[in-house]
Amino acid sequence: MDRDRIIKSIAYCGLICELCHQANECDGCKSEKNNCGKHLSDAGCFQRMCCIKKNINGCWECDNFPCDKDMYNNNHDPKIKAFARCIKEDGVENFINCVLENNKRGLDIKYQGDYDFRNETEVLALLRKGSLD
C-alpha cells in the first residue's frame, strides 16, 4: 500500500477513501472524482461542506469537534467519529500506522469490516491496540 496516497485520501470526516469499498469508482471526497454517496445525495455531506467553508483539512482540526451532525450523529456508524478522534488525539501519522499495522493483522476498515458495529471507545481500542483485550 502506498502510505502517502493513503494519507492524502483521508476524508474530511476521517474515513480513508483509498481503503473504502468504493475506491475503484471514487477518488475520495477531496478529489474531482468524488462519487461518495453522501456527496451525491441531495443534502450533500455536512462534514465536507463545513471543512471546506472553514478551510480545514478535516473535522479533527475543528474547535467544535465532534459535532452531532450528519456522519457524526448517533444513528451513524461510530467508526467515522472514532477515526477523526484518533487523528485529533494521536496525529495522522500514528493513525495511519495503527490502520496499516492492523491491516497486516487482518483487520479490515472497509464497510461491514472489523471496525463497524462497535461503539467509539471500542473502535479506538481496536485502532490503538489491534484488539479489544
Image (tube, rainbow, N blue to C red):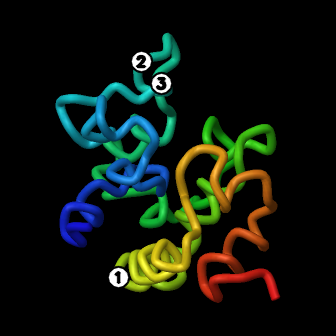
Q: How many C-alpha atoms fall within 10 Å of the one at disc 1: few (<14), some, or many (≥20)?
A: few
The residue nearer to you, when weighing 31 against 54, is 31
Distance Cα–Cα, label 1 vs label 3: 27 Å
Query: Residue 76: in sight, yes or no?
Result: yes
- Mark 3, other Cα within 10 Å: few <14 / some 14–19 / many ≥20: few
Instruction: Kindly indicate the quadrant of the structure image that contains residue 8.
Output: bottom left
**Label 2, residues with CA under 10 Å away: few <14, some 14-19, many ≥20:** few
Residue for badge 1? 93
Are dots 3 and 2 in contact, CB under 8 Å?
Answer: yes
Q: Quadrant of residue 6?
A: bottom left
Along the line of sight, which residue is nearer the eye, 118 or 68?
A: 118
Q: Could you tell me residue 32's position as x and y percent? A: 17, 31
Res 40 label: 2
Q: For the point 71% across and 81% down, which residue is it? A: 125
Q: Which amino acid type is shown beneath numbered disc 1? A: Glu
User: Quadrant of residue 71 in the image?
Assistant: top right
The image's mark for residue 37 is 3
